[in-house]
Image (spheres, rainbow, N blue to C red):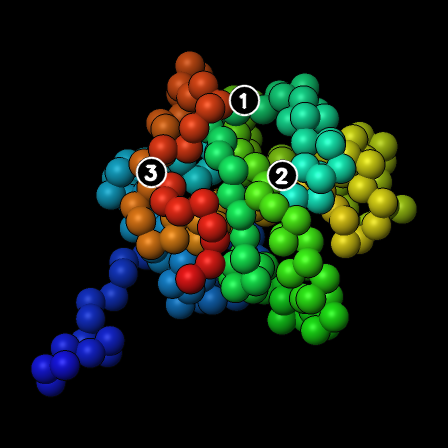
Amino acid sequence: MPEGRGCDAAPALAGPRWSRLTRLEGKDERLALDLCAREGWASLAQQFGEEGAYGFAERVALMWVRPDAVAAGVARQVLAATETAGFRPLAARPVTVDRCGVRALWAYMCRWATVERLWLLDALVALGPGLLVLWADDTGGEASARLTALKGSNAPGRWAGESLRDAAGSPNRLLTMVHAADEPADVIRELGEVGAGQRPRLPRVGRQEGDGTALPGLGPQAVGP
């Protein structure tokens, strides 16, 4: 490799003001160094422009109906409960997560996970593909925050009886059936992860946009290297 042409010499991927997209102190600094987050932002900014990318991340929610929900036959219940709560599907596609994808998708949670828990997650995602769904929320609030609240706790004893995990019949803290990006910053990061190095083409968020059938251009179905 010619001198000066290594990774250190490559131009940095521009990022947003992450503090606008996360409520957690210090998370903006971690995201600024996160390659998936930076790549996800670059794709959105190229397609929608900077302000359009902020608006997209704030107005959509990203859900992965996990393989345990598919295996249990409750994926339709999860989707129906989400629509009943006022979300509108924009696009969807099957997505398989491999063991490396587990550690990328849940990078922050995995820092505290035991090795045994990681192995159990590896076994869970090996069940097959889940369904990635992009939702719009026309209520005017932050879509990802509302979907995260609707998703419910991963502890069954803390449910109020109206969460998506309750609708799915999640029995414990491992078989939680549903994953959702917690806030706009996570929507961007997880789209960067699912994009697997390709630039996703995403539907514009309008009251009549999206038919809930395809998530065009999101690259390979497998999440991982």
Q: Looking at the figure, which quarter contains the C terminus?
A: bottom left
Residue at the farthest top position = 208
Mark earlier in primary sequence (2, 1): 2
Residue 119 at x, y = what percent?
69, 66
User: In this image, 194 relative to 110: left or right?
Assistant: left
Residue 109 at x, y = what percent?
64, 63
- Please identify the quarter of the rendering in which residue 129 is found: top right
Q: Nearer the viewer, residue 136 or 132?
A: 132
The amino acid pointed to by label 1 is Arg
User: In this image, 164 relative to 212: left or right?
Assistant: right
Describe the element under mark 2 as helix, strand or loop: strand
The amino acid pointed to by label 3 is Gly
Between circles 2 and 1, the one closer to the viewer is 2
Describe the element under mark 1 as helix, strand or loop: strand
Categorize mark 2 by other alpha carbons within 10 Å: few (<14), some (14-19), many (20+).
Answer: many
Looking at the image, residue 169 lies above or below residue 136: below
Residue at the farthest bottom position = 3
Mark earlier in primary sequence (3, 2): 2
Mark earlier in primary sequence (1, 3): 1
Can you see residue 205?
yes
Q: In the rendered image, which residue does mark 2 sit on?
A: 65
Residue 116 at x, y = what percent?
74, 70
Q: In the rendered image, which residue does mark 3 sit on?
A: 217
In space, the residues marked 2 and 1 are separated at their CA atoms by 15 Å
Q: In the rendered image, which residue does mark 1 sit on?
A: 88
Residue 212 at x, y = what percent?
49, 23
Describe the element under mark 3 as helix, strand or loop: loop
